[in-house]
Image (cartoon, rainbow, N blue to C red):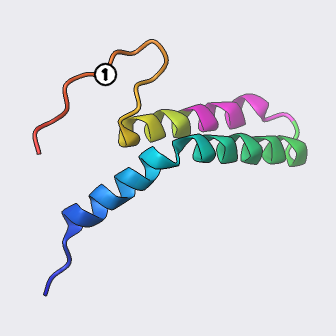
């Protein structure tokens, strides 16, 4: 009885897809908190949040603003 990593990956991707809006809201709240605690680094915090959101979009299969969904890689 082994670990089925493809099944785990599919479940994680599904969870990200189903909850992507909540995750993005959490990222925004975390950014606001970080900005309130660390002065002078707003652009770095915003850049990190944007990178995280881009990665979330790629992992969950959600196209970015203005992007057309491309072909999915073979399974």
63 is higher (above) or lower (below) than 12: above
Range of the magenta residues? 40-50
Task: Give coordinates of residue 9: x percent, y percent.
Answer: 29, 59
Q: Position of residue 3 (x, y in %)?
A: 20, 78
* Mark 1 closeness class: few <14, some 14–19, many ≥20 residues within 10 Å: few
Tag 1's secondary structure? loop
Q: Residue at x 58, y 31 (%)?
A: 50
Q: Quadrant of residue 63?
A: top left
The C terminus - image quarter = top left
For residue 30, above or below residue 3: above
Q: Identify which residue, 30 or 9, lies in the foreground.
A: 9
Q: Main secondary structure of the magenta part?
A: helix
Judge whether 9 appears above or below 25 on screen: below
- Tell me which residue sits at (23%, 64%) in the image: 7
Q: Position of residue 10 (x, y in %)?
A: 28, 56
Verify whether residue 49 appears in magenta: yes
- Reply yes or no: does residue 70 show up in magenta: no
């Amino acid at each position: 009885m082994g670990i089925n990593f493809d099944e785990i990956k599919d479940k994680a991707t599904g969870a990200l897809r189903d909850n992507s809006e909540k995750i993005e809201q959490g990222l925004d709240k975390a950014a606001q908190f970080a900005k309130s605690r660390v002065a002078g680094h707003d652009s770095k915090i915003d850049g990190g949040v944007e990178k995280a959101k881009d990665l979330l979009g790629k992992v969950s299969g959600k196209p970015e603003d203005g992007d057309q969904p491309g072909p999915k890689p073979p399974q």
